[in-house]
Structure formats: structure tokens, C-alpha cells
Amino acid sequence: MPTVPPEDAQLDYAPGAPGISPSWTSSAKDIVGTSLGPARLWFTLGFGIVNEVYYPRVDTPQIRDLGFIVAGPGGFWSEVKRNQNYSLRRMAPGAPAVEITHRHERYTLQLRITPDPRRDVLVIACQLDGDGELGLYVLLAPHLGATGYDNIATVERYSGRRVLLAEQGPFGMALAAADQHQADAFGRASAGYVGTSDGWQDFAQHGAMTWQYRSAGPGNVALMGELPRRAVLALGFGSSAEAAATLAISSLIQPFGNVLQQQIADWEGWLARCAERSPAMLDLPDAIRDQAVVSSIVLRSHLDKTYPGAMVASLSVPWGYTGNQRGGYHLVWPRDLVQCAGALLAFGAEQEARDTLRYLIATQTEDGHWNQNQWLGGTPYWQGIQLDETAMPVLLAQELEERDALGGIAVEDMVRRALGYIARMGPSTAQDRWEENEGINAYTLATTITALVAGAALLPSPEADWALALADFWNAHVEAWLTVSGTELAKEYDVPGYYVRVAPPSVVADAAASHAAVPIRNRRDNTGVPGDEQIGTEFLQLVRAGLRRADDPLILGSLKLADALLKTDTPNGPVWHRYRGDGYGEQEDGSAYDGAGIGRGWPLLTGERGEYELSAGNDPLPYLEAMAAMTSPGGMIPEQVWDTDPIPSRFLFPGRPTGSAMPLAWAHAEFVKLLVSRQIGHPFGRPRAAWQRYHGQRPVAEYAFWWPHAAIGSMPVGARLVVALPEACTVRWGVNGWQSVTDTPPVDTGLGFCATVLDTTGLPAGTAIDFTWRGQDGEWAGRNWRVEVTAAPQPAASSTTLQAAPRAAK
């Protein structure tokens, strides 16, 4: 054990305030994890050391990293994370408890890491072997309160032990160390300012630990402590440094194995309970089964404990080394949350999925929608509106109901409000799922249609009947609004037509509107791309949701274009870009995304393609294997992978993770759902009611809906025109210049709007329907509108048609 110097050997204050500007570390995570006990702590590992540790919520990182230096006589020193020669091993197949072994020609350093299930403490057992002259030092960079600014670090005695402490605002942190007898193990220690007087700078300048400063801060601070070759560290958090120290020391007053075994037992029990409610996986390759377990651990580890059921997008900071901002990935996105809860449900974690539904019901706005994203407590962050995020909680309720797993949760009010909002705002969305463009897109439209049908099975009449009628109308018009033919792309690739990525809201009245330029907001030029040249993968959701067949000619044409324009074959398998011209990703030279860049391949899109292949009758196993091959050493699936020539200096290699979010919880959810879909033989989460109603075929709608915000210009012969308004109004209407004028009263749909159904079924093609309305105050609308009756639609090249089915039974 190192010799402990006398207290007066330490200088009071470190020089160099306030330190360099703080930043987070790389998003490249090897492992993320938490305990299943009451402890409110989440940890991440990257480059073989501890990175961000989160406390007391899953959205609040409290340190930048905790690493090690091995040093000895003659100025030799080695920072282990920079050696890049380490291996990982989970200490039990189904638990986030990890053994890391760093190898160097002069030493081997073994780290065993687990959270304490009962305390807000991360425990690390350290063992240094090799050259007997070498010693071990720990470096710790606090970022309390999710910032590297204004932290205060001190080295103090507490309860007869030397501890490394830090505070900032309402948060405290403590690092304590114990030897094999559970006695204090810290030797020399020092606090300093990052970049000027921290421990790393000491070794860089002197090749040894020469500084012993008692305190540093406020500023960007760091701590260093000297350890014996065998020691156990406890990193604790609390409402003060003293509270954190009490917890840390408490964890050390027991064998490390006690903490480890409790962690393993808790997680193995959870996996066993899930297995009772999930499909068998014995026929899968070992690598895929192992990745399934890792992905389930990742998903479960993203759940918060203060707000059960809430989950952030990623326990990482994309391109975190570029600044102090933690970014939007520490927010709750209803879309990501439902994707992840659905995957947990597919894996058998019904309790967790119910908690998510409860959380979503609690945070639904009064008008029925959900925030684009929000802090865990429900406070909105960005202000966009995305209709798929309003539809997806309805689909989660339906998934639980189909499994008879709602557990007494009353969902009718939530569903009614959500479907009402979708009806009143759709079919166009203010933002697509990539949060960039207004308009109609296949992913959002398919998601809202299936939510209307699935939600109808959870509602009484008349709400259910109107939801189904609107779903049929939108479904019947998917191709009219979202496909083009005869374009230069169609001719070049010899396809009969294809789905555009997004069409403007005005396409409901003017099909030619889809040619308008679509702005690309993550590019510096932001010039946009003509709409009929903007290709994405959103159309695959039409097949996955059961609205179109996999062999539909327009689906096949779109698939051909997506493969030609968006696909990259990497050494680890195929990957797809989000859309043409995407700028969300590293620059050409590999430098970090800074608001603009070049979009890279997304593994979750590989999973979505696998779902399509399953629907087409093919085995999606190659897509599972590709996703598993694109992971970090510990199985973390990234948001994006590098898809061009390697840049070794930036750790960028084809088919390997970029600096984007890793792990992306949504990507792990996609892996789990694809795997379960393969096992059950159809896409997991495809609403039974939607499949029974459509079977992949385009319906003939009984009603055509006209809204002030979605004013259709025509309707097929034989349909009834519905004038949908936010309040009860009597509609006055006539034909061909106000002949045969009739006043028709409205009906309340129960979905937050009133519908006036005009008896137009007998009108021949070519008829013009003129109408206006009078409100309850007796005032007229002030203008007239017109809808043309056109010939009945023929079965399009896109699909066969079917008569709208009756309402699916509950």
C-alpha cells in the first residue's frame, strides 16, 4: 500500500482556475447498466473505463469519466484508456456487471464493475498485475448537475478515511477506496483544474504524481488518488458530499462479491420472468441470442426510477467531446419510448410496458397529443407536433390489450382524445419522424391509420365508427397523396411509380403539389430537393402495419429506388440512409456533426428492412446478424455507422459506430422486435384489428372527409361527403352552381369535431358540390367551397382494393 503523507504535505488550493472549457466524453459506449434494486444510479463504460454515471434520474449525468493511470520509476506512465488493448466480459450472461482487462507489455489491469443495488453507488474492484514497481492511480472528472462548470472538488478526511469529494448545486459525489481488509486504501490525493493542475497534467509534465492540492473550484475540476495494486473503489452520490461519502463507505464495508451476486441474482430473475411471456429462441445462433439479451438489458437500463415507465433516448452524449451540452438524447421522446416499451413487451416485460403506458397517459396534453419531447417530469422541451407520437401510445395500449395485459389500466379516455387530435390535425403532420418536414409521409400516415383502427376497437360507438371511417378514407388515398409515376427517377430505374418521402399538405387538393421542393434543414445550403426526387424508407411502414402487401408494385418500385439511392453495403452488412441529402452525421473529414454534415447509415433501418423481408416471406436473420455485427465491443447498437473510407485517427471504420448516439435505445428496440417477429412469423406490434380490416389491400372508402385544414378538391363517385368542423354547424349545400340547395345538420362524432354527412352517393361523376355553413351564432362562414365528383377509383398499380370491412370486434 502507498505511504500516506502527512496532512500538511497537501497544499490548500490548486492553481489554474477555472480550468479549460468542459466537455463530455465520446458517445462510444461499451456497456450501459443499472441495478434493479432501489438504487437510482446508471453507469456507462467506454474505451475500457467508466464514462458518464447518472443520478438520481436517467437524464442527469454526474461525471465525465473515471479512469486510471499506471506509473512507475523513470517517468513511465500509461493512461489505460489510450492503450486501446482491452477485453470485456459480462460476469453473468444476463446482468450488467462487467469485467474489463487492460493489457500492456508491462502490466495487466483488471476492473470488475457493478452498481450496488441498494445504494446510489458504483463499485469497482481493481487488480494490477505485472511489473512490481508500477503503481495505480485513479482519475475522476465530476460534472455534477450535468455540467462541468462550477464544480468544487476537495480531498478530505471523512469517518477516518481519505475521500475524494465534489459538489455542485444540490448534488454531491464521493469516491472512497478500501483494501482487502476493508480499510482505507487511498494514499496521496489531489484536486485540480482540468487542463492546468489536474492529475493528468501532473503526469504529462513530470512523469509522476507530484501535486497534492486539497481543493479546486468552482470550475472545471478533476480529482486523483493513489491506490494499492488491489483495491475496491466506491463512487457514491447524494444530496451533499458527506451524504455521498456515507453511501460510498457503506458499500465498501462488505466483500465486493456480495454486491456482485445481488446484482446478478436480480437480473437473472428478471430475465427468467420475461422468458415465461416471450417466444422461445433456441433455434437462433448463439450470437443473436446473446445480442437479444444485451438489447433487453440496454432497454431495461434506460428506464427511470423516479418516473417509472419513462425512458430517455440514449445514455450517451452524441459527439459529446465537442462541448458541455448533454443534448436532446436525455429527453423523453414519445416515439422512442413507445418503440422501446413495445420491444420490452415483445421480450415479455409486461410490467415495464404497463408503467410506460401509465406514464404516457399522465403526460398526455388536454387536447390529446403528446409533446415532441419532454423532461422526465413532463415539462416540454422542443415545441414541434408529430402525429406519429400521438398515434403510438394508442398502439401500445392496443398491444397490451391484445395480450390481455392492460392490468386494469383504463385507456378509453386517452384513446378518445388521441384519436380526436389525429382526426382534427391529420393527415398532414407538422413534423415527420425525423423532425424536419411538414406534410404527409407514409410512416406517419400508416401509423395514424393503424392507430385509428386499433383505437376503434377500444372505444364505443359513435367514436369507433367515425375513427374507422376516417381510417378507410386516408388509407384509400395513400397512393393519390404519396406516389408519383413517369418521373425521371421512375424512367431511370424502370419502375411503375414510387412513394415520395413527404408531400406538402396541399397535395390533398392538388396532386401536382408533390413536385415542390422539400427543404433539408441539416445541410448548410438548405436548398432542398424536388419532392418527387426525395426518397426515404418510410413506405416500408405501410407493409409492416398491414396496409399494403409486400409485393405491391409501388412498394417494389420504391424498394428498388431505396436500395439504389440509400443503401450502403458495409463489411458488417447492409445499412440504409434516412433519405437523399440527409445532413445529420459527421463531416466528410470525419469531424463531428455541428448542425450540418453528411447523414450516415442507420442500423435501425436495417431492422426495418428485415421486417419487410419477413412480410415478403423471407428469413430476416441476415438483417439481425448485420445489426449485431455493427455493435460496440459490449453489444451497443449505434444510431449511425460509418459508410465510406476509413479514418483510423478518428476511429471511423466502415460498418462500425460513428460519434452519434450509442446505444440508441430505439435501435435496440428494433433488434428485439425483429427477432420476436421472426419467431412469431409476422411483424410484432402489427395491430390485429388493422390486419383483419385491410389484409394489405387498399379499401374503398364509404366517406370522403373535407376539413378546413385539409380541403380535398375531389371525391370519388358513390362516396358520401363529410364536412368536418370543430363545432356544430349546419351545412348548406347544392350542386353545379347551387342547384337543389339543402341544409343538413351536424352530428357529434365524440372525437372533438362535428360531422355533417351530405347525401352525395347518387351524384354522377363531373358533379360540382358547393357548400358553406352557418354556426350556432347564426353567422355564415363568409365564403363558399367546392368539391368535384370524379370517376370511381380503379384498382391502382399500387394494390388491389377491398370494400371497407365492418368494425373489428373488441
Image (cartoon, helix red, strand yellow):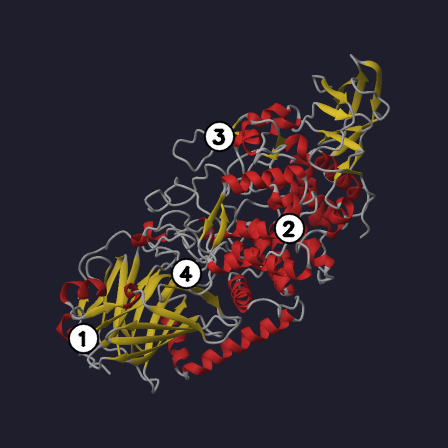
Asked whether residue 779 appears in the rendered view, the answer is: no
Q: Amino acid at mark 4?
A: Lys
Disc 3 to disc 1, how far (Cα)? 60 Å
Q: Amino acid at mark 1?
A: Gly
- Residue shown at 78%/17% (left/top)? 766
Q: Amino acid at mark 2?
A: Pro
Q: In the rendered structure, are the residues bearing label 2 and label 4 in contact, judged by CB atoms less than 8 Å apart?
A: no
* Residue indicated by mark 3: 529
Task: Specify whether 791 is left or right of 572.
Answer: right
- Residue shown at 65%/64% (left/top)? 350
Q: Dot 1, how many residues are within 10 Å of its Cα: few (below 14), some (14-19), or many (20+)?
A: some
Q: In the rendered structure, are the residues bearing label 2 and label 1 in contact, judged by CB atoms less than 8 Å apart?
A: no
* Residue indicated by mark 1: 72
Taking depth in this image into account, of 466 and 362 the one nearest to the observer is: 466
* Residue indicated by mark 4: 29
Q: Position of residue 124 (x, y in %)?
A: 37, 74
Disc 2 to disc 1, how far (Cα)? 58 Å
* Residue indicated by mark 2: 393
Q: Dot 4, how many residues are within 10 Å of its Cα: few (below 14), some (14-19), or many (20+)?
A: many
- Residue shown at 59%/71% (left/top)? 271
Disc 4 to disc 3, how far (Cα)? 35 Å
**Nearer the viewer's eye, disc 4 or disc 3?**
3
In the rendered image, the vertical position of residue 630 relative to residue 496, given as above or below:
below
What is the secondary structure assignment of the residue under circle 2? helix
Q: Earlier in the sequence, mark 3 or mark 2?
A: 2
What is the secondary structure assignment of the residue under circle 3? strand
What is the secondary structure assignment of the residue under circle 1? loop
Asked whether residue 393 appears in the rendered view, the answer is: yes
Taking depth in this image into account, of 8 and 200 the one nearest to the observer is: 200
**Nearer the viewer's eye, disc 3 or disc 2?**
3
